[in-house]
Image (tube, helix red, strand yellow):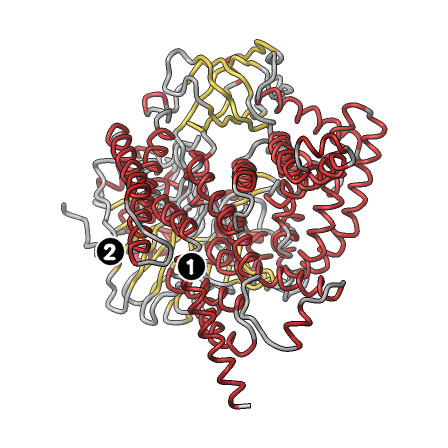
Amino acid sequence: MKNQGVDEHMSTLAWLADLARRTLDQYGWPICVLAWVAGTWLAQQQSELPASGVLWLACAGALALGLCTAMRVPGGRGSRSGVIKLVVISLLMTTTAFFWTSLAGVHALAGSLHTQDEARNLQVIGRIASLPDRVERGLRFTFEVQDCGGCSVQGRAVLLGWYADEASAAPSVPVLRAGQRWQFTVQLKRRYGAVNPHGFDTELWLLEQGVAATGSVRPREGFALVEEHAAGFSRIAIERLRGRMRAAIEQGLEPSLERGVVVALALGDQQSVPPSAWAVYNATGVGHLLSISGLHITMVASLLGGLAAWCWRRSRTLIHRLPAPEVFWLISAVSALAYALLAGWSVPAQRTVWMLLAAVVARLIARQASAGHVLASAALVVLIIDPFAVLSPGAWFSFGAVAFLMLAGQRIPEQGARAAAETQSGWPERLRQAAAAQWAVSLGTLPLAVLFFSTVSLVSPLANALAIPWVSLLVTPLALLGALLVLLVEPLGQGVLSAAAALMVPLNAALSWAGSQAWATMSLPAPSAWMLVLAFLGGIGLVILRGWARLFALPLVLPLLLNPGYRPAEDVWRTTFIDVGQGMAVLIQRGERAWLYDTGALYSEQSNAGQRIVVPLLKAWGVRRLDGLIVSHADSDHSGGAAAVLQALPVAWMASSLSPEHALPALARRLGIKSLPCAQGQGFAVAGLQMEFLHPPAEWLEGPLIRTNALSCTLRVRDGRRTLLLTGDIEAPQEARLLAWDAAGLKSDVLLVPHHGSKTSSTQGFIAATAPQVAVVQAGWRNRFGHPHPDVLQRYAAAGVQVLNTAETGAIELAVDASGQMRWIRHRDVRIPYWRTRAGLPAALNVPAEGEKLEPARGR
């Protein structure tokens, strides 16, 4: 037994040594591609981009040096000179990728909206270039500007919203179709989005989509349909075809979740699936199946390619002209391209097509090419065409899953009966191989899921084992076939679509049950870089090692699983003013305890700040429960995300000025959460913090209806050294009442500016009584209310108060230590990528830098 253990140990070491040799010897090309990936990633970390002329010269020079090195420098496989040659070529690949990616960034930014064209009426003529999406009170669509009087976005694409004007005699939005040519007036603004820790980068997404600006149509200024549709075949013509298909599907199927799924699978229109269904799909880890992912495109391409190859083999004449395997690859490539176009030609679909085309070319040119070389070639093609893919979670998931599937085939060879048994075929062995593949994908994508989403679905392996073949092999082909047939033979097409919808009914029932279980998902904080690297190494070890050897890989994953998150130190309490646009959301933390004041805005029936910003931040920082939730008042820019927060994580209690009949207190009661009024005088002391409500009086909450702003919960938080005052949307009358009740008790070091800086608030008397060192405004960038009002900013400046605005700084962190020192972090300035829009701060305001201690500003 001892000799057997020694033999197994030596076999493991020999295998590891052989793997290292083969990595340098046989995988030189994948290593070079990894070098290109590194160069692309490094280029995307820049804050400023060099001039395009310099980049062209540098890129050409690095590429020429690489080619000369590859052709002129000798080096055989496995030799020292070969290793040196590989290192030199890899460095040159990194350099070339860096300059190429920088050049792509310069080109992407070239057509951005100029500041002089921002927030003014522009007369534009152009075409609707996308399938219009339904949003609250209107439609959103991509518009190609053909003429705007020489403005900065002429010839570029902009993202527009056309909303119903409730004050107009004709409030409805006209019927919009892709390909239509319109003339109307718009107001545009530069690419801009909220900036929060671990938050979605809207500005990067818009740049990646080729959107030069965002804005809205001004229907009161007049509009006219110039041309119904464009002639000839073009991408816009395809978008028009997609619109006809969506209308036919929605007409042929009754409104239901299944109809939305069919539209999403056939046309890539994910807006058709309601948020409640997305919550279930994401909780079970099958959300990728409801988008036009690489899996669907690959499956459809393989089915059509296999069918074509089968028919090809039936003809002796054709089989001698062109081998059936080559027919399979060619038809698969064409099918993938056609499906991606029909599905909207989204950026993820484009990446999949480039990846498949690269794989097809590699297979046709070098039929003996290894899977690793094919995957590396596909990655190189994708990054050359779309350098932004290196920042896309979808790209990392796609390539990572395939890479780990390939790693699952590289195992330590075993001797004896076990090795012989593995070579046997049959259903048990196939099931074992399928389980091993799912195990490999789950381990490979675990670090990515935690990094990008801070959530791991525990039921994902079983759910995907059921859903992937069901959706990919049955539902998706039927949905696609029905969408095509419904335009040709409507009754037959509707029958096929009905069959696709019917197949989703039992799957939705099973997924709903699995996703509703308390153990379905696990939230993990966003990992640091070293945790991520160790987790990937551990995942590789768990996949390729066998038996007891896996014990050495398991500890590498533990730091990721046991990560405590981003918590303040024991003697520090932290306040985070979350960037939720035009709304409020403030997170207060002390050790493991956390309280949330307001939850941001309700954007639409399908989207809110709680779901999109607040909950992801809480999960990324490791906040597993809230010790309290305060909803200041009923206005949707304060309470819009509360339902999402209540349903996402445990909450000890909820305090608000809402009536007991309001939907939020009712939801809290259904969830077993205690609902309290935020009446004046109520308070508590916990973890060294004293929290007290200063407004509204209890009789206001029980009396006749009062304006919601007047009922805003006003909360004072202090630790004996520093005081924070959160005011909601109180206005001048409520400020006067607070001054009369306890003017001395209003003294604060940090003030949340009332009502986002509205001119109806922040009276001189209130500012003098609170006397803050810093006042924080939570408002949307270029919001339609004009918050904060210039007069209000002037009043704070006259009092010597430093003003910070989340619209200009992003999320703001304030950390107060045991000595009372205040340190600030402005997240829009923590990392400034080259695509970030500089909002520009008013020159008159003295803004504290990151880490700077703020001293009293009066008397300056």
Residue nearest the viewer, comparing 486 with 782:
486
374 with respect to 246 (left or right)? left
Residue 678, percent from left and from top: 50, 58
Residue 264, percent from left and from top: 66, 38
Query: Mark 2 or 1 closer to N-term?
Result: 1
Residue 776, percent from left and from top: 33, 47
Q: Which mark is residue 536?
A: none
Figure quadrant of residue 684: bottom left
Residue 242, percent from left and from top: 66, 27
Q: Quadrant of the C terminus?
A: top left
The residue labelled by disc 1 is: 23
Q: Quadrant of the N terminus?
A: bottom right
The residue drawn where x is 62% and y is 55% is 285
Which secondary structure, mark 2?
A: loop
Which residue is the extreme one toward the left?
860
Q: Amino acid at mark 1?
A: Thr
Q: Is residue 764 above or below residue 458?
A: above
Residue 191 appearing in the image = yes
The residue labelled by disc 2 is: 851
Which secondary structure, mark 1?
A: helix
Residue 729 appearing in the image = no
| Separation (CA) of disc 2 from disc 1 | 45 Å
Q: Is residue 358 above or below residue 35?
A: above
The residue drawn where x is 19% and y is 53% is 856
